Structure formats: C-alpha cells, structure tokens
Image (cartoon, rainbow, N blue to C red):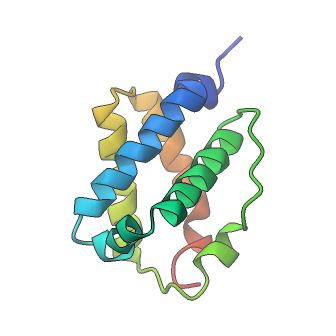
Amino acid sequence: MSRTLYERLGELKGITKLVDDVVNIHMSNPSVSPRFLPLKEQPERLNTIKQHTVNFFCAGAGGPQEYKGRDMVSTHKGMNISEQEFLAVVDDILEGMNVNNYKDEEKKDVLAILYSLKEMIIRV
C-alpha cells in the first residue's frame, strides 16, 4: 500500500516544520516579505496563520487534521496577489522542501496542489 503525501511529508511534525521554515524564507524574500514582515509585530496572528496553514496542508495531504479556516478565495480576496508573488511563494515552498530534504516525488505532489489553488489566490 502506498503512503499518503501526509505520511511522506513527515505527518504533523514534518509539515509544521516545513511551514515554519517557509514562513521564515518568506520573511527574507523581497518579492513577498512586505506581506509577511508586518506579522512579526503580531505574533499571535502569525501563529494563527501558521496553524491554519498547517491544518490546511495536513488535511489536503491526507492527514486526519480538520481545516476550519476560510476558503482560499475568502482568505485572499482583496489582497491583489500577483502572478509574480504567487511564483515567489511557490519557489519559497520548494526551497523549504529542499532544506528539509524532501524527494522529487513529494515536491511534484506539492506543486500539483499549489497550482490547483492558483486561480483561487491570484487577483481575487
């Protein structure tokens, strides 16, 4: 029996570390840091966003966690996220996956998820 993406990403612990690492990468990426750096001054909000992201990712990857946050369109509505910002975020996620030594198969599966969400994020 093949393992779920959730299992291959290291379950809750692995996905939580990946999200933490990716947020740190976002903070230093000039393409998206203006959206993330202000959250350093709002640690409770940043932690809430991280937890929603972890739950969203876990649920979408086949884990038992339940995502109770807003849908993608509601979350990103009015942010006017550009294609370039979306691609910068994707690059940061791949960098985080590289830092955590994920294999190409996991990267491909995560990319497929990210691109399935693209139209719900860009310029909504």
Direction top: furthest residue? 1
Q: Nearer the viewer, residue 108 or 61?
A: 61
- Give left or right: position of 33 versus 65: left
Image location (x, y in percent) of residue 58: 64, 39
Image location (x, y in percent) of residue 112: 54, 48
Image location (x, y in percent) of residue 103: 39, 26
Q: Nearer the viewer, residue 111 or 51?
A: 51
Where is the C terminus found, in terms of image quarters? bottom right
Residue 63 vertical placement versus 25 (above, below): above
Q: Quadrant of residue 48?
A: bottom right
Residue 104 vertical placement versus 113 (above, below): above
Image location (x, y in percent) of residue 69: 72, 61
Residue 23 vertical placement versus 105 (above, below): below
User: In this view of the protein, can residue 60 be seen by the observer?
Assistant: yes
Write the residue at 59% across / 31% down. Answer: 12
Q: Quadrant of residue 66?
A: top right
Where is the N terminus found, in terms of image quarters? top right
User: In this view of the protein, can residue 93 be seen by the observer?
Assistant: no
